[in-house]
Amino acid sequence: MNSTVLFSKTPPLKLFFLASIPGAISMLASALYQTIDGVFVGQYLKATAFAALNLAMPFVIINFSLADLIGVGSSVPISVSLGRNERKEANNIFTCACLMIIGAGVVVGGIMYAIAPLLIQLMGAEGEFAALAVQYLRVYALCSPFTTITFALDNFLRISGFIRGSMTMNILMSALSAGLEFLFLGVLGWGIWAAALATCSGMFICVLIFFVPFFRGKATLRFCRPRFTGKMIRQIIACGTPNFLNNIAGRITSIIMNAILVRLGGENAVSVYGILMFAEGFVQPLLYGMCDSLQPAVGYNWGARKFSRVRAIEKCCFIASGIVSLLAVVVIALLPAQITRLFVADVSPEVLSMSVLALQLFSLTYITRWFSFATQSYMLAIEKPLPASIISVSTALIFPVILVAALWPLGLTGIWLNFAVTSALAAIMSFIILKKLRHELRKPDVAE
């Protein structure tokens, strides 16, 4: 669909369904693959490999974080520029962002490959546990120049009106990755490195396919001769900082948590934490898919100064996020044993008991998590990176670290409670931010 018509003329509720449902399906496909990834590793390679995957995963996400900063950071000014009918500027930001992401993949991937053994050693892992984690991390590092642009491509497709194309890409990528992982692990019997290779291969194939409309000039955004300016780079960094900080801060928190868990409960505690992360990795992408898929429309209308449409779109986003979150509370709280057995085939009674308690406490997170998530997305879409960054860093790092100390007397139970208390504090902070900005957010439309 023509992006101008979609963003500026489509009724807000219809726009919400046209954009958010494919976005949610896209993220659901990705979440299902992440779940399958954990299931395959846990079932075929057993508990040590599953724990190693979870130990390495925070560094894998850090490896993607700089590319994500550029991808998300460029999407916001691109959408606003299109709303202002500044197409040349939008195309230049798009072209420069793609080049920056490839360059970042080379640099960050190279560094990550070189220091992978040191990083895993610092986590306290030893022997086979450490060796498997290093293998997994190094495959992602080697493939960085070819795969890190995937998430930015998803944004660029939606900005250009290829909403179903974005959905198709994510579904195809998940299906390819799952099929390759089954082949590598289940049929050929390869090791944990092959699980990472399957994911990277699926990403790279989809990048080659779905960049075709941009190279052929069939998309709203087109490649042009790049013109890098300090102002443009600063704008990209400012708009991408909330997501970047969320990724980095969240991974630092995961690293801290894993280091504590290795010492408090060993491999078993790391595995249980991994189960929680896979549960979060299923719910959070649904929230992200709905909110993020609406950012181009929100940014476009903010740039066009149609503020009433911005408010109407965001109202749909908040309501839908709340519904999804509360459903997650019910499912996780009622099915903790089934969720545990999904990831760990040879689960011991001790691990099962620990995991059931952890999941039940973790489910409380989603009573309030939706509110801060939707608020952060809203702030980012309307070029307010500072409040979005405050919510992001507080949720991902500041609150969890403070609560580690505050809840320390509770031992492992305090770690499992950390998520829910963090979420409640972030919701309160988000409410305060929205209240402080209420006058600006209620501005009347400006006639063309």
Image: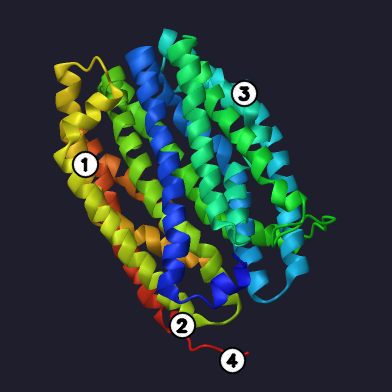
* Dot 1 crowding, Cα within 10 Å, few <14, some 14–19, many 20+: many
Q: Is residue 448 left or right of residue 348?
A: right
- Residue 299: image location, x then y, percent: 56, 69
Residue sitting at x 45%, y 79%: 441
- Dot 3: element: helix
Mark 4 burial class by Cα count in 10 Å: few <14, some 14-19, many 20+: few
Q: Earlier in the sequence, mark 4 or mark 1?
A: 1
| Disc 2, SS | helix
Query: How far apart in space, not on screen, are marks 4 and 1 (Cα)?
Result: 48 Å
Is the residue under label 2 in contact with that under label 3 (CB below 8 Å)?
no
Residue type indicated by callout 4: Ala
| Residue 243 as seen in the image, left or right of residue 259 | right
- Above or below: residue 44 compared with residue 340: above
The residue under the point 28% across, 21% down is 344
Q: Nearer the viewer, mark 3 or mark 1?
A: 1
- Residue type at mark 3 is Tyr
Q: Amino acid at mark 1?
A: Ile
* N-term mark: 1 or 2: 2
Q: CA distance from mark 3 to mark 2?
A: 48 Å
Q: Which residue is mark 4?
A: 447
Q: Residue at x 58, y 54 (%)?
A: 155
95 left or right of 439 in image: right
Amino acid type, callout 2: Ser
Tell me the tag on residue 332: 1
Residue 442 rendering spot, x and y as whole percentages: 43, 84
Numbered mark located on residue 308 in the image: 2
Element marked by disc 1: helix
> Counting residues from the N terminus, which is met first, the one under dot 3 or under dot 2?
3
Taking depth in this image into account, of 184 and 273 the one nearest to the observer is 184
Please tell me which of labels 4 and 2 falls first in the chain.
2
Looking at this view, name the residue that lies furthest to the right: 225
